[in-house]
Amino acid sequence: MPEYRRVLLDGAVVETQRSGDELIARDGRRVPVEDAVHLPPVVPSKIIAVHLNHRSRVTEFGAELPAAPTYFHKPTSSLNAHRGAVVRPERCRWLNYEGEIAVVIGRACRNIAPGDAAQYIAGYTVANDFGLHDFRDTDAGSMLRVKGSDTLCPLGPGLVTEWDFRGKWLRTHVNGRLVQDGSTDEMAWDAHYLVADIARTITLVPGDVLLTGTPAGSRPVGPGDVVEVSVDGLGTLRNHVVSGPVPVRTDVGAQPMESEEVRSTALGGDWELRGVRAPRPSG
């Protein structure tokens, strides 16, 4: 399956194709995969993510799937890349990983049937839909700061075309320890359905990204942790968490919180007050 990566080569953004252990630019320059400075593999105009989709995640929260998928938006300023640093701001504690598969649009797409969606998909990549749950109480509806803060949308390492999403395994490791282990077959709504659903009212254009949800096992990570998301046929997306040097300002806006809903969501419902207030999980 062809794989394409965007890298920084000699100070310029270059599109390359992977060939074994090398990345080859269109002008013939080569760089070893391990030496490349990676960029997000696509430049989307929008990033749309589904809330609940994996059945193991639904079971973990003791929740129920809605009748149809629901979504939230991550701004493009949240984009990050393979090997990029994910920043947990000072005064924030509840930063969760969520290993996912990302659909990348290849053609302008509007008002299509699920059965035709494959014609509009350029390919797929690995995603980590990080969430800063400290802001969950104030942004629960929009998820804007929870999921849209800077660096919280790593994608990569490359865009893989001619990949079939069916029957693929997704696994997340933190510091080498397996923490998520799920299959695309447990998705309530597959990639084609999600594309067609969004495109009913929102035009999708080349490069746009749809995140397809995470399996059970999302938990908080902190500075120094290394998070790796691996998907059969798509490779491994690796990121490390760092502490932001500047605290979240206290003179404007709602402040980071540690409420029942914050803890419940961040810990997957696994805490002593579970059931006091039903969480609305994401991913």
Image (tube, rainbow, N blue to C red):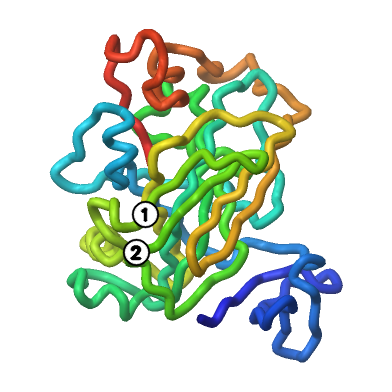
State the mark number for residue 129.
none
Q: Nearer the viewer, residue 207 or 60?
A: 60
State the mark number for residue 167.
2
Residue 274 relative to residue 151: left or right:
left
**Taking 262 as reference, is 139 above or below it?**
below
Q: Which of marks 2 and 1 is nearer the N terminus?
A: 2
Residue 69 relative to residue 171: left or right:
left
**Taking 209 as reference, is 69 above or below it?**
above
The residue sitting at 28% across, 60% down in the picture is 190
Q: What kind of residue is marked 2?
A: Gly
Residue 41 position within the rendered picture, expressed as x and y whole percent measured from the top left:
59, 67
Residue at numbered disc 1: 183
Give the quarter of the image for residue 26: bottom right
Residue 226 position within the rendered picture, expressed as x and y whole percent measured from the top left:
68, 41
**Taking 58 as reference, is 74 above or below it?**
below
- Considering the numbered disc 2 on the image, is that residue within a helix, a strand or a loop? loop
The residue sitting at 40% across, 20% down in the picture is 270
Residue 236 position within the rendered picture, expressed as x and y whole percent measured from the top left:
60, 59
The residue sitting at 36% across, 44% down in the picture is 72
Looking at the image, the residue that sits furthest to the front is 177
Label pair 2/1, CB-CB below 8 angstroms? yes
- Marks 2/1: CA distance? 6 Å
Residue 139 relative to residue 223: left or right:
left
| Any part of residue 148 in sight | no
